[in-house]
Amino acid sequence: MRLFTPLRPAPGAILARANPVAKLAAAAVLMIGLFVAADALTPSIVLAGEASAIPLTGLRWRDLLARGWPLLLAALAVGILNTLFAPERPAAESLGAGIGLGLRLLGIAIAGLLALATTDPTDLSDALQQQLHLSPRFAIGTLAAVRLLPIMAGEWQTLSLARRARGVEAGRSPVAAARIGFGMLLALLVGAVRRATRLATAMEARGFGARECRSVARPQRMRGGDWTLVAAALALAAGATAVSVAAGSWRFVFG
């Protein structure tokens, strides 16, 4: 499975049927709880809660691992680098800080992944307008951005094949790999900006945004289950913090 390939959860799954705004709110609550905690116990508890919620997403573990392995690799790299290059302090303290930072980043990334992977882009756009009352321009722009992610994945693969056909390979040199990767990212960014400009011009030419009044074709409502989801996220974040405080390991990130 390639990066940005759309995941298709089971339509009847609990999280797949939840309101997109409720899922974003639940993810934001967990992210805030993880951001302010600088210990390793709090993110461990939150990660356990997120893992227990995966059966509710309607997604297979295999698909999530195929999509999320870069997150695991990034969290591992951050934890190792933070341990090796941390300011002078006891080895056990440096190791704990590195593990805590890696787990926090992993928990934040998984919260966002579960929220977005179970959300249809069209439902997200409708909910942003109806529940958060955001501008249709912003909501439709979000829809277009999510829809274009698979195209960007295809362009990344095309760039990789083009460089390989020209004999541009990094071999075993990490410096060369970083240089090639940066060049591909720059090319991908330039292509994305050009595509966004063409898309915006096409939408303007079709009169999008000429009138403020827009009808609603797909009503999105906050139901009892949606509020339960947000409350569960609050309980998980608060419970993880309370357990960490009781254990004496909780530390404020700026403390």
Image: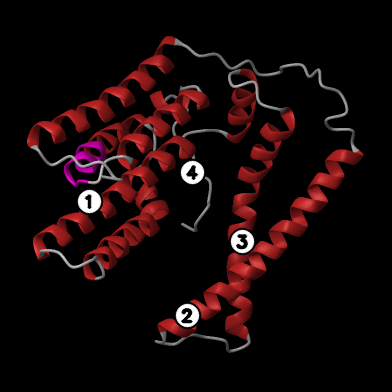
Q: CA distance from mark 4 to mark 3?
A: 16 Å
Q: Amino acid at mark 3?
A: Gly
CB atoms at circles 3 and 1 under 8 Å apart? Answer: no
Q: Say whether residue 171 is left or right of residue 165.
A: left
Q: Secondary structure at mark 4?
A: loop
Residue for badge 2: 177
Which residue is more in the foreground, 33 or 193?
Answer: 33
- The tag earlier along the polypeptide, 2 or 3, is 3
Name the mark nearer the viewer: 2 or 3.
2
What's the residue at 52%, 85% (across, down)? 169
What's the residue at 20%, 55% (across, down)? 97
Q: CA distance from mark 3 to mark 1?
A: 35 Å
Find residue 71 and report its horizontal and vertical position in percent. 37, 55
The 10 Å Cα crowd at callout 1, few under 14, some 14 to 19, many 20 or more, is many
Q: Say whether residue 246 is left or right of residue 140.
A: left
Disc assigned to residue 100 = 1
Which residue is more in the foreground, 236 or 15?
Answer: 236
- The tag earlier along the polypeptide, 4 or 3, is 4
- Judged from this view, the residue extending furthest toward the front is 255
Q: CA distance from mark 2 to mark 4?
A: 29 Å
Q: Which residues are magenta?
A: 39-47
The 10 Å Cα crowd at callout 4, few under 14, some 14 to 19, many 20 or more, is some
- The tag earlier along the polypeptide, 2 or 4, is 4
The quadrant of the image that shows the C terminus is top left
Find residue 124 and report its horizontal and vertical position in percent. 58, 30
What's the residue at 84%, 32% (across, down)? 208
Residue for badge 3: 154
Disc assigned to residue 7 = 4
Q: Amino acid at mark 4?
A: Leu
